[in-house]
Image: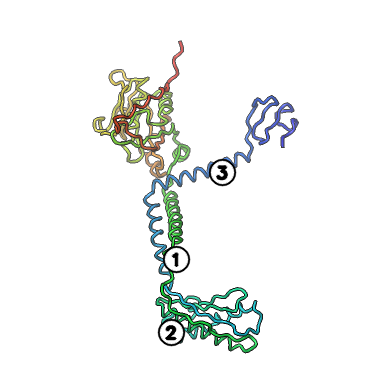
Amino acid sequence: MRMRDSDSPLGSGLKRSVTGCATVCPAGHAVRVQRCHGCQGRRAVNTGLNDAVSTLWWGVRHFALVAVGCVLAVAVVLPLLLTRGGPAYHASALVVAQRLGTDLAALQGYAQATFEEGAVARSIAAGFGNVGPVDSIVPDRVSLDTEQDSIVLRVNGYDDSAQGAADLANAAAAAFVAELNGAGEGVGHFEAQSLASPPAEPVPGLGSTPIALVLGLAAGVVLGLAVVSLLLISRRPVMDAADATEITGVPVMGSITLPRQGRGRDLAPTDVGGLIPVCRRLLAMRPQVIVLTNAGGFEVQRRQVCLAIAATLGRVRAIRLLTEPPLAAAGPATVTVDSLQAGRGAEITLVDGPRPGGVVRPGVSSATVLLVRQGLPERALRLAVAEHLSGLASDRLLMLRKSRVVRSERQSPTSRPRPRAATTPLEAPARG
């Protein structure tokens, strides 16, 4: 229902939309966007749920061996446990009411109460020495099945051998008939219509059915998710920039995506997602020295990011690149730097290494960028900030994510070269 013009907080010439979240004029021009508390609450719940699902999915991928191990272990163990769940053979004897002196509807309850009263179990315990405790004989070794509006009562026997199952069923049927006829002619007269015969084949257990496999897989998935959740709770991984800033108090200058390399291919700066906005922010800080360090042991990825930044900044600035260890030791996993300008009068010195040494001198504007891998534990992030950052206003964090594998263009000699993406300007052109 729409609000009246006079109900609008901005005056009689304005009206609210049906949702109550946007305020527009009668001509349809937006005047001001107002968000109600209900929308904010729903958005917060949805955001929290999405973050939880994303974190759990990251945990499943990160701890894939643990999750798969739980699924396989339970999928194998549970069917084995169900297979050992009881005797393998089942035999049945039939007891019939030849003359019934009571109501047919009351026969089921009376028969079940008589069978479970204890006399049948005591008779079985006296005649067989290996049936277990008396209290567990019914229904573990013998049981009774009744049907609605039927005078036929089925006595079942269970044992590890076919002959043992038949003997238990016949002995239980005889004791049961004696108890039923002992109540007098007013109840009726019962006889054993057919005795149990040894079964030819054992009863297939639940562990050998597809249901057991489905149950095992489902239980394994639940256990795997529970174990992964416990690992996530104990590690408390840092998943995004907001979490990193909240934990350390250091601003995050952006997030970059570093693809996994295919064989036979060097990583190009254009393959690093989110690099252009990060380089813009670095140029806006106007540093003379940029120190790139990392939290955790992924020096190869830090080297790739450093070379990608050097290649991108080299389009608009002269770059002097200092690496630790030297660039020649970077190995095959390097970024191709075509436009790197090095030499005298370098405007920006880019230092790759955990220890800048004597590069940063007093009076020189510098920026220290700490590369943080997605999923790094909170404790490790705090220790890295305390070790590598000095608490200056120019300190920054840079989030690093991993994405899909970049396929090699050298795998097929007939593959067409990939067209170059349009170059995004790092700086606005100077006005004359």
Q: What quarter of the picture does the N terminus occupy?
A: top right
Q: At which x and y percent is residue 251?
A: 45, 33
- Between marks 2 and 1 in the image, the one whose residue lies nearer the viewer: 1
Q: At which x and y percent is residue 137?
A: 48, 79
Q: Secondary structure at mark 2?
A: loop
What residue would you read off at disc 3? 45
Residue that sits furthest to the top in the current view: 432
At x 43%, y 59%, the residue is 213
How many angstroms separate mark 3 from mark 1 (CA)?
42 Å
Q: At which x and y percent is residue 42?
A: 59, 42
Of labels 2 and 1, earlier in sequence is: 2
Of labels 3 and 1, earlier in sequence is: 3
What residue would you read off at disc 1? 206
Q: Amino acid at mark 3?
A: Val
What residue would you read off at disc 2? 128
- Classify 10 Å Cα crowding around label 3: few (below 14), some (14-19), many (20 and above): few
At x 39%, y 52%, the residue is 68
